[in-house]
Image (cartoon, helix red, strand yellow):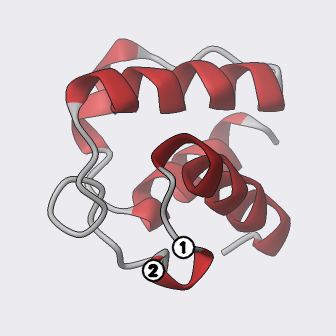
Amino acid sequence: MNTAIYEKVKDILVESLNVSAVEIKPESELVNDLGINSLELADLVFTCEDSFDIEIDDKALGTFKTVADVVDYLEKVTK
């Protein structure tokens, strides 16, 4: 896992969800562990798109179950 991407995603989640950084781990589930809702997921996507200067495919959203899923996707599209 790319540490720089993970840390950036973690920072985005801390800021947008008002959760503690210690609560966020690669295996943390976005909905069950972090309590993210559909609006917050959309915000996460927009923020990641801006931060990484990419466009996230709508089909990819369904694959984002954990923090690691988001990081893995970003690793693939930012190469």
Image position of 19 (left or right of 58): right
Residue 3 in the image: state x and y as whole percent: 78, 74
C-beta proximity under 8 Å, tags 1 and 2: yes
Compared with 61, 19 (above or below) is: below
> In the rendered structure, which amino acid carries the disc numbered 1?
Ser
- How far is mark 1 from mark 2, CA to CA? 5 Å
Residue indicated by mark 1: 20
Q: Quadrant of the N terminus?
A: bottom right
Residue 59 in the image: state x and y as whole percent: 30, 20
Image position of 64 (left or right of 37): right
Q: Nearer the viewer, residue 39 or 52?
A: 39
Res 22 → quadrant: bottom right
User: Which SS class for mark 1?
Assistant: loop
Residue 75 in the image: state x and y as whole percent: 68, 51
Which disc number belongs to residue 78?
A: none
Q: Nearer the viewer, residue 28 or 16?
A: 16
Compared with 4, 48 (above or below) is: above
User: Which SS class for mark 2?
Assistant: helix
Which disc number belongs to residue 23?
A: 2
Q: Residue at coordinates 54% horizontally, 73% vertically from top-left? A: 20
Q: Residue at coordinates 60% horizontally, 75% vertically from top-left? A: 21
Compared with 68, 37 (above or below) is: above
Residue 19 in the image: state x and y as whole percent: 48, 63
State the residue lying farthest toward the left. 32
Image position of 48 (left or right of 13): right
Res 40 → quadrant: top left
Label 1 Cα crowd, 10 Å radius (few <14 / some 14-19 / many 20+)? few
Compared with 9, 23 (above or below) is: below
